[in-house]
Every structure is written in C-alpha cells, then in structure tokens.
Image (tube, rainbow, N blue to C red):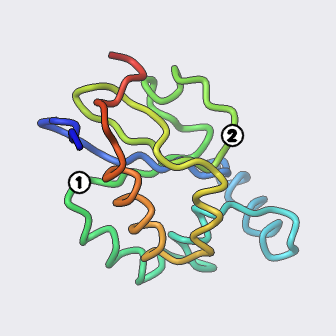
C-alpha cells in the first residue's frame, strides 16, 4: 500500500454551526432543545467548553487538527464549495480533500476516540496522494 508522502499535513474540522455570537447562541439553544445537531461539535465540546477527551485526543494526533465554522473558513477550504457539514478535511502537500463526511463523523457517536480511529483508518486506506487542488 502506497502512503502519501508529505512534508506537511493537517486535519481541518468544519462545524455545522456559525462562529458569530448569535450563531453560537442559536446553536447552543437549538442543541439543548433537540433542534440543532453537529456531530463534530458534540465530539469536541461540552455544554460550555472543550471536552477533556477531545483535548487528550488532539494532543495524541501527530498532525495539527484545526477547526472552523461554516462562516469562518480559510479561503482554500471555502474554494472547495462544501455543502454538507460537519466534515474533516485532510490537507497535505498534495492538496486538500474530505477525509470524513457527516455520516462518518455521526458514526463516532460523540466519542473523540472513535473520531481518532476513523481518522487513522481513513488515512491508512489511502493508496494515492490527495488530489483536490494538485
């Protein structure tokens, strides 16, 4: 199995929520009322702050894991034209692509360890370099 060779790599998680004060509040209230759900938010955050399990998972990863909201995406991510959230992208010297989509993140059932396993499994199954923008 050929692994992508890359000098740099990072994961980019995109929440199914907006970053504004209003967006955060709307999501928080909606989540408590059962009207809003973001499986990546559920993995990374508790009611108020980051989950300890997520902090530990993030520290174990050998590459950075950056997170953004739908409305504060870096230009390179925005250029992908994503329409379904949440997602986890992988970015390397070879480009950027979706590594985990909404269904795969939902299947983690709120567990950071499950997300970590899904990331590792998805990367391990790679047979060609990443190819969205190069």
Image x and y of residue 24, in percent: 67, 58
Image x and y of residue 131, in percent: 37, 23
Q: Earlier in the sequence, mark 2 or mark 1?
A: 1
Quarter holding the N terminus is top left
Image x and y of residue 41, in percent: 59, 64
> Looking at the image, which residue is at 37% across and 41% down?
90
> Looking at the image, which residue is at 50% across and 47% down?
68
Determine the residue located farthest toward the front in the rendered image: 1
**Of helix, strand and loop, which one carries label 1?**
loop
* Cα–Cα gap, marks 2 and 1: 24 Å
When asked about the image quadrant of residue 127, the answer is top left
Q: Are marks 2 and 1 in contact (CB under 8 Å)?
A: no
Mark 1 surroundings: few (<14), some (14-19) or many (≥20) residues within 10 A = few
Quarter holding the C terminus is top left
Q: Is residue 82 left or right of residue 132?
A: right
Mark 2 surroundings: few (<14), some (14-19) or many (≥20) residues within 10 A = few
Q: Which dot marks residue 84?
A: 2
Q: Which dot marks residue 16?
A: none
Q: Is residue 65 left or right of residue 67?
A: left
Q: Foreground: 30 or 91? A: 91
> Looking at the image, which residue is at 39% across and 67% down?
116
> Looking at the image, which residue is at 24% across and 71% down?
60
**Of helix, strand and loop, which one carries label 2?**
loop
Q: Foreground: 130 or 65? A: 130
When asked about the image quadrant of residue 5, the answer is top left
Image x and y of residue 53, in percent: 42, 82
The vertical placement of 43 against 38, above or below, is below
Q: Which residue is mark 1?
A: 63
The vertical placement of 132 against 56, above or below, is above
């Amino acid at each position: 199995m050929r692994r992508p060779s890359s000098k740099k790599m990072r994961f980019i998680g995109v929440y199914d929520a907006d970053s504004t004060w209003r967006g955060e509040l709307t999501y928080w209230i909606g989540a408590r009322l059962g009207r809003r759900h973001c499986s990546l938010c559920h993995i990374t955050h508790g009611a108020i702050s980051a989950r300890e399990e997520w902090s530990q998972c993030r520290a174990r990863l050998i590459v950075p894991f950056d997170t953004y909201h739908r409305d504060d995406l870096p230009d390179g991510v925005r250029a992908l034209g994503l329409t379904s959230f949440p997602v986890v992208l992988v970015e390397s010297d070879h480009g950027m692509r979706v590594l985990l989509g909404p269904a795969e993140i939902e299947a983690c059932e709120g567990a950071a360890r499950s997300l970590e396993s899904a990331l590792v499994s998805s990367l391990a199954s790679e047979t060609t370099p990443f190819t969205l923008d190069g």
